[in-house]
Image (cartoon, rainbow, N blue to C red):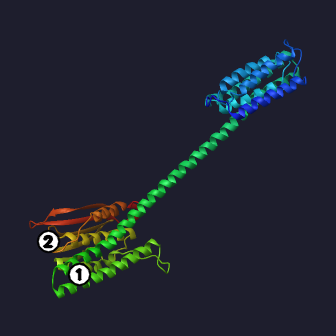
Amino acid sequence: MFTSIRPHRDDVALAVSGLLGGLLLWLLGLHTQGGRPFSAPWVTLVPLTVIAAMELLRRSAPRTALTVATLALVADQFTRGSLATVLMFTDVMYAAVLYGTPAAARRLPVATLLITVASTIGVLAWFRKPEALLIGVVIGLVSFIPAITGVSVRNHRTAAEAARLAAAQTARLAEMDRVQAVIAERARMARELHDLVANHLSAVAIHSTAALSIDDPDTSRNALKVIRENSVEGLAEMRRLIGLLREGGEDGAPAAAPTLASLDALIEQANTNGAPSGLACTLEDTREAGSAALPTPVELAAYRIVQESLTNALKHAAPGPVTVRLDLTGAVLAVEVTSVFGSRSGPTAPGSGAGLVGMRERVALLGGTFRAGAEPDGDGTKIWRVRAELPVREREMRE
């Protein structure tokens, strides 16, 4: 497998050390065999030099290195031989499996095993002596063992790389989960903050405008009373939210979330805030008395939907009735808020549209349905209807 034209520094070190070791053995007159056709001492240096040169290509061109090194090893058998040549060949075989193509890594161990077995049987049949088995052992040590070693090291490297990639993928997924969790938490905090503050600040804005625009002591006194009540309640709600974000108050207990049992107080507050605008809020709860408690996420979502709908009515609704209806049919809680659709005289508060977005998000998180819009009424007028249907069974709600 070709990776780089320039030899790796480790390959250069192996080539130089192998060549110098072979030269030292040659100078000392140490050879592996004798009585060969080319018995001149200098001939031994030719395959030694060639196979040392192939060490430079063991990583960048393993197939070429193995082919030429095999020819050099065969040529070495016709000379007086050098141990350094044999040792460098084993390294080239090992590198061919380790750095070669996957196909080469699969085929070379099988091929060297077959060559070892065939050579052992052939030599034994030719010489008919038990000592001939040693030749097969040497062939296996020179070819098969390096190939098997290369396969083992390659498999370990592949497993380590796969583990590294899996760890990196896990880290990326964990980071994505963390980012999504942060986004979801920020959206939840935005919904809670909007629902907690918008109602009280809308009342403060409307009644302060009335106090400033109407020069009447009683009107101003009543407006200031409503402003003070909403300021105090808004501050208490903000403290509750801060306690919720801190996972508990000073005593370590988590702040209690509002429930549908608190709707009477919410309706009463809405009547107080909406009286100057001609709004009359009523609650119609058709649920059976003593029915089982609803899951906490459903109670909180229903309460916030009613709260935001009353806030929108205070901001935009024309004078008239504002009706809140609750109905539990089977496993679905229906929450509906209707008000008169139209313009009205007097002070109003601007809206950003975040309230409707927040209500849709709350319903979507529970796997319910939501719709809001103007509809014709029976007497020719129009009403603004907000309706949410929330599943009350835990297994039917989306996580």
The quarter of the rendered structure image containing the N terminus is top right
| Residue for point 20% across, 73% down | 322
Residue 276 appears in which quarter of the rendering? bottom left
Q: Is residue 292 left or right of residue 163?
A: left
The quarter of the rendered structure image containing the C terminus is bottom left
Q: Nearer the viewer, residue 383 or 242?
A: 242
**Residue 107 image position (x, y, % from top left):** 66, 27
Q: Nearer the viewer, residue 9 or 301?
A: 9
Q: Nearer the viewer, residue 228 or 110?
A: 228
Q: Amino acid at mark 2?
A: Arg
Q: Is residue 108 left or right of residue 131?
A: left
- The residue to which callout 1 is attached is 272
- Confirm whether residue 137 shows in the render: no
Q: Amino acid at mark 1?
A: Thr
Residue 219 appears in which quarter of the rendering? bottom left
| Residue for point 83% across, 29% down | 21
- Sequence-wise, the earlier of marks 1 and 2 is 1
**Residue 251 image position (x, y, % from top left):** 49, 81
**Residue 374 image position (x, y, % from top left):** 18, 63
Which residue is outermost to the top? Answer: 37
- The residue to which callout 2 is attached is 344
**Residue 230 image position (x, y, % from top left):** 29, 80
Q: Is residue 371 left or right of residue 232?
A: left
